[in-house]
């Protein structure tokens, strides 16, 4: 009897598997000074109310908040000054890609990510003009050196995820609607400690990747020394085949309860490092010194490790 029940499941499985994965071609290789031509600096008031002063490009370069060499791009919070009275906060950087993407793969080779009390770094994609109607995918995000990575979709109303999905991470709230529970979104918490913060850095960082299609959004993470890193991810070369990347850490399918195409416009890649604010400030842990704002204002040395170091970002498209 069970044989007859299993047969159609296999058909379903192979039928469904055709929507996973494809071969993509390199459309943009961003490394070193290429970050300056591919990204705009956003000297804006932090929408998440962080204790930061996002600087323009000239200030960032002249104060070494961003730094490039042939194969490195560093983006950091200031670690030298006490925050002056009346300032919006500690100087930091937020950059947004000039190009926007629909169906694509973005592969982030990251050697170091910001760590320390009060830090709230993020690598994400959104449409800043249409938010939330244009959608948001947080690829790499966390706070205060706490826990593992959390990848999250944020959408307009009418996008709910199934509880059971083919992914290695653990789902949180299933409703992606920004209006529910203070913009919690529909997060997936990653399993490996190497996916975030001090443990990510101690292991040489690694690779984050997103594949976005009208049928699904997937996010993967591989630590630097993970023996299962796909060869095309390690190479960051001319093509990638996501069919060979294994089960993603986070997976958000388009279904009858969430039509991804109608909830996502072309999105830009954004990289920002805020301090305290709506999330990191709200749950500032007792294991960190003082209050979040006081710590940020008066302890520049606490931000020595509050930096991203990118080896490259590669963007792949289908044609
Ligand atoms: C804040 O950033 C702007 C550049 O965007 C810069 O001119 C200004 O000096 C910064 N504020 C402080 C207190 O450093
Ligand atoms: C600027 O930052 C880079 C990367 O962190 C560092 O290697 C370099 O020594 C810094 N330069 C100065 C003048 O501090
Ligand atoms: C690190 C950081 O600043 N993260 C935030 C950047 O801003 C967007 C909204 O504007 C937040 O969603 C990110 O979490």
Image: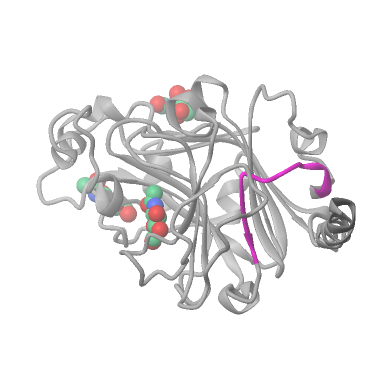
For the C terminus, give its image quadrant.
bottom right
Vertical order, 129 against 164 (above or below)? below
Determine whether, in the image, residue 105 is placed left or right of residue 123: right
Determine whether, in the image, residue 224 is placed left or right of residue 42: right
Based on the picture, tell me whether residue 248 belongs to the magenta stretch. Answer: yes
- Of residues 72 and 213, which is closer to you in this image? 213
**Residue at figure coordinates x 46%, y 66% from the top left:** 175
* Quadrant of the image where one finds ligand 2: top left
Vertical order, 291 against 304 (above or below)? below
Numbered-mark total? 0
Q: Is residue 118 visible?
A: yes
* Magenta segment: 243-253
Vertical order, 192 against 27 (above or below)? above
Looking at the picture, how far across and down is residue 26, in whole percent? 80, 51
**Residue at figure coordinates x 36%, y 34% from the top left:** 146
Based on the picture, tell me whether residue 298 belongs to the magenta stretch. Answer: no
Looking at the picture, how far across and down is residue 202, in whole percent? 50, 20
Give the quadrant of residue 301: top left
Give the quadrant of residue 107: top right
**Residue at figure coordinates x 57%, y 23% from the top left:** 204
For the N terminus, give its image quadrant.
bottom right
Determine whether, in the image, residue 26 is placed left or right of residue 125: right
Q: Is residue 50 visible?
A: no
Looking at the picture, how far across and down is residue 43, in whole percent? 36, 58
What kind of colouring is applied to the model shown?
one colour
């Amino acid at each position: 009897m069970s044989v007859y029940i299993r047969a159609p499941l296999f058909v379903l499985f192979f039928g469904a598997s055709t929507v996973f994965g494809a071969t993509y071609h390199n459309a943009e290789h961003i490394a070193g000074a290429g970050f300056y031509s591919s990204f705009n600096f956003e000297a804006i008031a932090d929408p998440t109310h962080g204790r930061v002063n996002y600087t323009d490009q000239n200030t960032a370069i002249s104060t070494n908040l961003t730094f490039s060499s042939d194969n490195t791009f560093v983006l950091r919070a200031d670690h030298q000054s006490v925050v002056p009275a009346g300032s919006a906060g500690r100087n930091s950087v937020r950059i947004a890609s000039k190009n926007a993407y629909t169906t694509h793969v973005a592969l982030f080779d990251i050697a170091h990510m910001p760590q320390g009390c009060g830090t709230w770094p993020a690598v994400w994609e959104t449409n800043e003009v249409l938010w939330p109607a244009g959608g948001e995918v947080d690829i790499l995000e966390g706070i205060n050196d706490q826990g593992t990575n959390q990848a999250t979709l944020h959408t307009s109303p009418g996008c709910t995820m199934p509880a059971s999905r083919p992914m290695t991470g653990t789902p949180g709230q299933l409703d992606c609607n920004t209006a529910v529970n203070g913009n919690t979104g529909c997060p997936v918490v990653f399993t490996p400690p190497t996916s975030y913060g001090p443990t990510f850095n101690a292991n040489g960082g690694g690779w984050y990747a997103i594949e976005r299609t009208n049928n699904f959004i997937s996010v993967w993470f591989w630590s630097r020394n993970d023996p299962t890193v796909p060869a095309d991810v390690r190479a960051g070369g001319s093509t990638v085949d996501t069919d060979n990347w294994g089960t993603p850490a986070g997976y958000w399918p388009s279904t009858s309860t969430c039509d991804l195409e109608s909830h996502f416009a072309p999105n830009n890649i954004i990289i920002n490092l805020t301090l305290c604010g709506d999330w990191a400030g709200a749950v500032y842990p007792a294991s960190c010194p003082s209050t979040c704002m006081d710590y940020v204002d008066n302890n520049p040395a606490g931000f020595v490790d509050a930096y991203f170091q990118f080896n490259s970002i590669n963007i792949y498209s289908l044609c």
